[in-house]
Image (cartoon, helix red, strand yellow):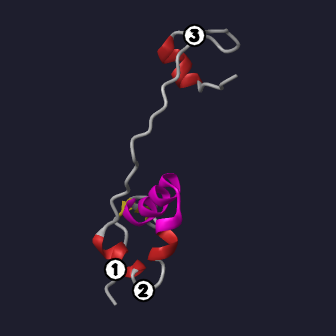
């Protein structure tokens, strides 16, 4: 049994609880995360070994925390502040 989100069910034209036959192909392509240069430099100070050990999903999450705009106090999007040591 494989769960499928409502969004994907709608795209496939199936309803919740409906039984369907499908083929699943294993995706073995390597996953690489592009780490921004300033984040990589900060990691070189002690966290790079930890980042290398993480799964693709967890690496992506950490990179997105650095790259994603953060809301300001007033609720509008703002660029992340980055300082250079």
Q: Is mark 3 on a helix, strand or loop?
A: loop
Q: Does residue 17 sit above or below 6 in this rendering?
A: above
Residue at 44%, 39% (x, y): give it.
28
**Residue located beneath label 1 in the image:** 41
Residue at 67%, 9% (x, y): give it.
18
Are circles 1 and 2 on residues that touch, CB within 8 Å?
yes
Which quadrant would residue 29 be assigned to in this image?
A: top left
Binning the other alpha carbons within 10 Å of mark 2 as few (below 14), some (14 to 19) or many (20 upward) gives: few
Q: Does residue 49 sit above or below 55 in this rendering?
A: below
Tell me the chief SS of the magenta region: helix
Q: Does residue 68 sit above or below 16 in this rendering?
A: below
| 22 sits left or right of 84 in the view | right
3 or 1: mark nearer the eye: 1
Residue at 57%, 10% (x, y): give it.
14
**Residue located beneath label 2 in the image:** 45
Spatial distance from mark 1 to mark 2, Cα to Cα? 7 Å
**Residue located beneath label 3 in the image:** 14
Instruction: Tell which circle, 3 or 2, labels the residue nearer the N-terminal end.
Output: 3
Spatial distance from mark 3 to mark 2, Cα to Cα? 51 Å
Instruction: Tell which circle, 3 or 1, labels the residue nearer the N-terminal end.
Output: 3
| 45 sits left or right of 36 in the view | right
The magenta stretch spans which residues?
Answer: 52-68
Q: Which residue is at the front of the view, 76 or 16?
A: 16
Q: Position of residue 83 (x, y in %)?
A: 34, 83
Residue extending farthest bottom: 85
């Amino acid at each position: 049994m494989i769960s499928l989100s409502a969004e994907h069910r709608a795209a496939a034209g199936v309803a919740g609880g409906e039984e369907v036959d499908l083929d699943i192909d294993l995706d073995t392509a390597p996953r690489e995360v592009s780490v921004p240069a300033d984040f990589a430099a900060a990691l070189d100070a002690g966290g790079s070994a930890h980042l290398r050990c993480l799964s693709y999903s967890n690496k992506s999450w950490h990179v997105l925390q650095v790259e994603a705009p953060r809301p300001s106090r007033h609720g509008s999007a703002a660029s992340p502040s980055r300082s250079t040591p």
